[in-house]
Amino acid sequence: MREALKAMEAAMGDRDVRFSEEAKEESLEKGFLRVAREGKYYSARLSESTPNSCFPSSTLSPNYLRSPRFAIHQFEEAFNPPNQGFMAAGRHSGYRENEFRDKDSDVDLSRRKDYYQDRERRGGHDPRDRVRVRQRDVKEREAINGAYRPPSGLGNSSGGRSGDHHSSRSRFHREAVDREPGELSSGSSSDEHEATVSVIRDNLVNNQENGTLGSLNKKRKFSPIIWDRDDGKLNSAVNSRNKNGHPMEAVALPPPPQLPEGFVPVSSINSGQLTAEHTSPSDVKVTVDSPQDQQYRDQEPGQVDEDEEDFSLAPNISTSRWADSNNGLDDDETEDLKEDIVPKKRRNTPLVNPAEQRLLKVPSPEVGEVIPWERVEGPATKSSGSEGERRDTDQDVEVDKNDYMDVDEDANGNVAENLSDVYSDDDVGRTKSPETVQPPQRFINMLQGCRSVDEFERLNKIDEGTYGVVYRAKDKKTGEVVALKKVKMEKEREGFPLTSLREINILLSFYHPSIVDVKEVVVGSSLDSIFMVMEYMEHDLKGLMETMKQPFSQSEVKCLMLQLLEGVKYLHDNWVLHRDLKTSNLLMNNRGELKICDFGLARQYGSPLKPYTHLVVTLWYRAPELLLGIKEYSTAIDMWSLGCIMAELLAKEPLFSGKTELDQLDKIFRTLGTPNEKIWPGFAKLPGLKVNFVKQPYNRLREKFPATCFSGRPTLSEAGFDLLNKLLTYDPEKRITAEAALNHAWFREVPLPKSKDFMPTFPAQHAQDRRLRRIMKSPDPLEEQRLKELKQGELGPVGLFG
Ligand SMILES: Nc1ncnc2c1ncn2[C@@H]1O[C@H](COP(=O)(O)OP(=O)(O)OP(=O)(O)O)[C@@H](O)[C@H]1O
């Protein structure tokens, strides 16, 4: 650690940062350095002593330690207010004139110390203790419930009762709520398939006998939550675009976690070099009972819980890698700062393959220094991403001609590249060379600043969302076809929209094959027109499914879900919640690649931050805990969305298409059964549970996805249904994690996931404005609202690019 600190000093030496001995001691203890320079805060997390992120100091090599420095550059540039030239690289004088806070201290650790002492006095305890307690708890539970059984143990029904592991927790009574079946409600009709009680009962009994509803012990990600403080400020979280960008905290994240056993994601620029020693954010696990499908395991058909009052408190999970450090940041100023936290530049890699090592040997770019790609990689070793981009260009010409992409041509042209990057039928173990994917070229010319949007030729408008208008455009120099997302500024009175800053930062920072790549930021004629230059994707899944006659097959859904889960796992491993996963935010190209886009609502999680709004996630994909007003939520909200998406991919129609929040809940309850304290401890206390919802005691999801069917309904195997149930588990604590889902048996059974190369291709949608077309068809109230806004002409001046 000491060496690490020295290395950090050296790495940051040009910024004239000095750490006092005392500060070093503090840092060793807390794994966190905090620096105030020129009115801005920078934080570098050493992570060793932080819960959930232990890794040995040997990994804090100078290479690793470059990242705080990178991050500082990045944040300085990103948070230069627009009038100083947003993203105008090299304008370091900019922020000096815009100092948000003027702190003299170089290392701001004393408040943290005070905070801990204060906590101590108030009987609080170090969050790390909580981890230890939890870990002990895990062991105890494992002893009670038996050893961990992986998801492949489908059909095992002998797991612990869902309530068992809560038995030792404190108990409380909920207010009695008298409800009658069908009592609700929202006034909306249900689209459920009606089935007789006896059929349902038979199904349930059969399933139980078959063991399909049996409980499984599973490892559960010990996910951190967000602590709420202030209901009144909820809207500020939603409308945070109205805020000025605060000085940001550049946070060094630890190396990525170990991949699931036997699984090598498409993104494998990493290897297992560090995995044995590292702990990921998701590595602290608890054993819990299995999810949704077992929610009614102990419930006889027709039986409504009579012991609902006798339940246990849901655990207050509040441990995160950030919690320790952040607990020390207890003044408002710091809370503000934390609220606006964005992730630092980070790659999904412990950087071990030779190409990557070469890359690391190149010193980090200095201010004003241009580092051409060739200098890093050599001209012969372009990343597959770059190749992909070039292919995009070529293909797009093809698309323009006949509106179809030819996958064979593609494969012929790039066989080697593609073959290493797919889920082939005989390669379900997903082993692949770690050298297939390289990080993209994203060095910014610090002297010249951003390029102008004039360097692109507008081809057509693709879509328009809340925060941006997306165009298809061509780079005049390279001919490459890209997507340009113009940040909407018209409603901003106080500078650059924070949501866009977050999106730009996240997308510039992250690199993963399942996350849309932002190549650069360009400026329009006025400084307030900013464009993100993204790789162009021919489709979004929502639009695509609308054009399809048949739904995706199971093997195609598997291919898509694997990519989606990999992307979401990457986000969650990097402490980012997407918070708006839906089919229109999943892009697909005609190479069978799926990429997540729209990070406007994404944010970092895991700290005791300002309250998180529950008004995230488009209604149809919104988790029940959000619909019921919970504000302490975590990665599980994204996993629910994934359940809805999986069902939609299989059925080619949304699973729960509510018109209002109540209607949405009603639809969910009618399909999955009304939750109760037994299957979801804490349910009765949820803030939104003021309405008497329909009391539907059975999980009827299987009716929508039978194992066999001749009436055209989508079929789903037992394993597939098990995964779907686990994604759609009510209790967020029991909901499956991305990592566990990736290891699910469904992906290993026949039909195996389709290779990306053999995914179907579709006519490109670029000639149409996707959103307008979608709005015409979609009853999504949010979409309708947006259409209204569009019609009201709030779009600002129209130029070449809007
Ligand atoms: N890189 C891309 N390539 C092709 N199309 C894209 C790309 N990025 C976005 N789109 C299209 O533009 C649409 C809107 O993009 P995006 O969701 O990022 O905007 P938004 O304003 O944040 O939308 P929302 O209102 O859903 O929050 C997407 O649904 C997709 O159809």
Image: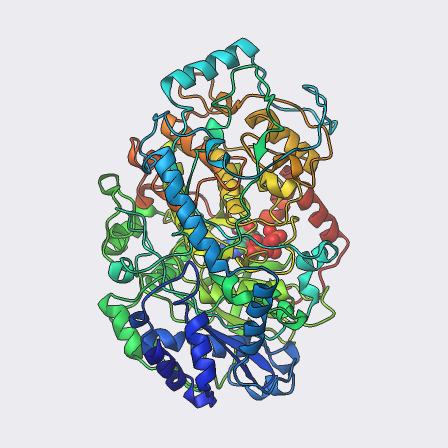
Classify residue 683 as left or right of residue 738. right
x and y percentages locating residue 620 in the rendered image: 60, 39
Closer to us: 610 or 677:
677
* Quarter of the figure with the C terminus: bottom right
Q: Is residue 158 above or below residue 579?
A: above
The answer to whether residue 323 of the structure is visible from this angle is yes
Residue at image position (59%, 56%) is 601
Classify residue 624 as left or right of residue 554. right
Residue at image position (60%, 41%) is 625
x and y percentages locating residue 264 in the rendered image: 28, 51
Residue at image position (56%, 69%) is 117
The answer to whether residue 717 of the structure is visible from this angle is no
Q: Is residue 540 above or below residue 311?
A: below
Q: Is residue 683 above or below residue 21?
A: above
Task: Please identify the quarter of the rendering in which residue 674 is found.
Answer: top right
Closer to us: 294 or 126:
126
Q: Find ligand 1 in the image and state its quadrant.
A: bottom right
Classify residue 696 as left or right of residue 376. right
Name the outermost residue toward the right: 792
x and y percentages locating residue 662 in the rendered image: 70, 34
* Quarter of the figure with the N terminus: bottom left
